Image (cartoon, helix red, strand yellow):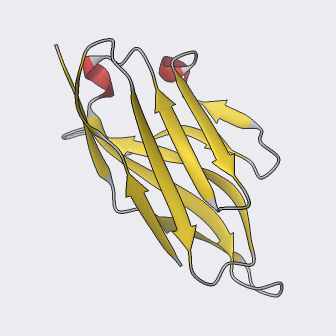
Amino acid sequence: VQLVQSGGGLVQVGESLRLSCAASGSIFSINDMGWYRQAPEKQRELVGTISSAGFTNYKFSVKGRFTISRDNAKNTVHLQMNSLKPEDTAVYYCYAQVRRSWYSAESDYWGQGTQVTVSS
């Protein structure tokens, strides 16, 4: 199973970015998907999650600015980031809870990470 991310880059304060993540390989089902981020010299933190039914949960500081969506048919998850702030600068990682067959347990898989830099 591979998760490949796209998007990211350098933006100004108040601008928007969209990150995408596509899962491929031997996939029977995917439960939760979501995004983490890690700023320099800080621990990785959860940005938000989305269940297979589409229920979302967000870190308090991004609520109302970030939106997570997914396409179950394509095994993709997206992170729309609006009104970006300098404190959103970090490497962003997608993840997916994947079951590879009907009899296997779920395992977490991670994207390669993508840099988001918000300049003031």
For residue 102, which quarter of the picture? bottom right
What residue sits 83% from the left and 47% below the top? 53
- Image x and y of residue 30, in percent: 71, 65
| Horizontal relation, residue 68 to residue 94: left or right | right
Could you tell me if residue 75 is visible in this image? yes
Vertical placement of residue 93 versus 81, above or below: below
- Image x and y of residue 55, in percent: 77, 38
- Image x and y of residue 36, in percent: 45, 45
Please give the count of numbered marks on the rendered protein: 0
In the rendered image, the residue lying farthest to the left is 120
| Horizontal relation, residue 66 to residue 83: left or right | right
Return the residue nearer the eye: 93 or 7: 7
What residue sits 26% from the left and 30% below the top? 89
Return the residue nearer the eye: 2 or 48: 2
Could you tell me if residue 43 is visible in this image? no
| Horizontal relation, residue 73 to residue 53: left or right | left
What residue sits 67% from the left and 78% below the top? 27
